[in-house]
Amino acid sequence: MAPSYGRTLPNTYVFLRLPSDIVKLIELKPNTIIEVGKYGTFSSNLLIGRPYYTTFEILDKREGEAHVRLRYVPAKELNAEVVAEYDAEVKDGDVGSETVDLDEERVAAVEKDNRLTMDNATRQNLSHLEIEELKQTASGREIIDTIMANHNALDEKTAYSKAKYSLRKAKKYLKRFTVLPMEIGTLQDYVREKEPGRILEMREESLALITAWSNAHFSEALTGASADAQSGRWLAVDDSGGLIVAALAERMGILRKDEAEANVVSGSQDGDHSMPDAPAPTEDGPSHRDFPLPAASNTITNLHSMVQQNVSLLKFFGYDSNTPDTDHPLHDRLLPISWLQLLHPDQDPTYREPEVVNEGTLQTYKSGKKGTYYKKRRRWARCKAIVDNARAGGFEGLVMASHMDPANTLAHLIPLIRGGGHVVIYSPVIEPLVSLMDLYSRERRAAYISALSQRPDEVPSTEDFPLDPRLLLAPTLQTSRIREWQVLPGRTHPLMTSKGGSEGFVFTARRVIPLEGGVEARGNFGRKRKAPGDTGGTVGE
């Protein structure tokens, strides 16, 4: 889902799609120079405030100008080549006509192919030096037209071959780019091309499966008798650099700030802008940006194994845990917790309460020491609230994408999910999830229940049952991969340039709560067949 605003804003990240289909990630900082490789450079101020999905062309710098200019390329000009290609096909084969009267010349034109065409450097009249001189004086479109006009064997090519040749030259000489918004799908493809291991080689279709089965959504705050209860809480185990957290936050509507909050008045270039007002103090005291208390609803508890959580990809959406923004929705809704805090909170020094200093002694402290004392108290209060709420359970669902074996971690995570919650686990390889399917299979569940019925006072051995198979219902293992195809008359086949890598597999199940005690059914509930002439009335006693 694109941002709610349809234009670029300063100090945000955007993508530039170049004619060579390469996507470049840039940060729109005011008064800076943006480099796009061989296509040139331009000022970032020329892009701020422009609408997304707009194509621009970099023009040559005129005499006396400090920077180059950008030209807006209208949609009519962008689609001119496509329309021309279609007209050429109609002219060659009368596409769409019911009756076609072909003479010998028309038959030769329809049956023309490029099997005997020798496309080499000798067919081009322009030399390399002449083309380089042409680059200094002419625009990209003029260079393409000149090159095609000086090609000796252009008439021997088919309409489709001409279109491919023109497109290849356009990617090489046109200095154009298209502005794309920061979206999860585009960011995922960009990172996967650069560092696939950073996101566990996760594809866009795999992420779509994860978010769909997680059932993550925005939840209204409870009122009335249930006002104290928390709603809309999801548990995430994210080792993909924050990609899973970003996908869940987007479905919950807490990934980006609103346009009114994100908009910044650019004004003059001297940087003299009015500062925003300080946050108003609440009943519990002033609002602090470093360690805020967690929100009551629509939260994501991110379980990590490091000293700090790795959500570096969230910075592209305006959230940085090192320099938090109090106006960002994730500021008090993304709750980090480590495995040590979840399993053994007493061993974590952050969970231990700092020493309480009385008011008289506190007044003798200097301002720096007093601020450090309050900061430690705020950090401890936030850590304690997050850990206590996480250990209490009641999460709406669990989404896991980690290098750890899920068979060793689910014993601690499944009890934290409420009844009916969704459990979604991603793995780049299938072996860990196949083992998980066996641990929660129907046969293992029946054997577990049989073992409990024989010895109700004893828990079955963990060697035979590492996990309780009664806690998850309907385990499913699935995968999805989109394969691009070239669809042309007589030339339909899958593209051979698709990127390889891991397929990606997703395990899904539903959390259930087993019934305590035995279940007995008595009586014969079989329905008797009615005899002919039976009216179905009751028989008197």
Image: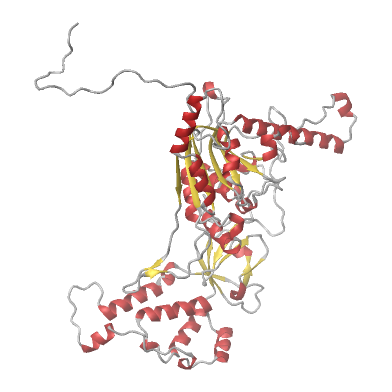
Towards the viewer: 210 or 409: 409
> In the figure, is residue 308 to the left or right of 440?
right
135 relative to 496 in the view: left or right: right
- Answer left or right for 322 relative to 44: right
Q: Residue at x 60, y 58 (%)?
A: 197
250 w.r.t. 531: above or below: below
The residue closer to the viewer here, 423 or 115, is: 423
Whether residue 342 can be seen here: yes
Q: Nearer the viewer, residue 430 or 288?
A: 430
Residue 441 on image: x %, y % = 46, 40
Quarter of the C terminus within the rendering: top left
| Quarter assignment of residue 104 | bottom left
The residue most toward the front is 454
Image coordinates of residue 452 in percent, x first then y, are 50, 27
Residue 9 can be seen in this image = no
Query: Eyeballing the image, is 96 above or below 535?
Result: below
Answer above or below: position of 93 versus 248. Answer: below
Instruction: Tell me residue 148's x, y (percent).
Output: 44, 86
Image position, residue 132 (x, y; %): 58, 87
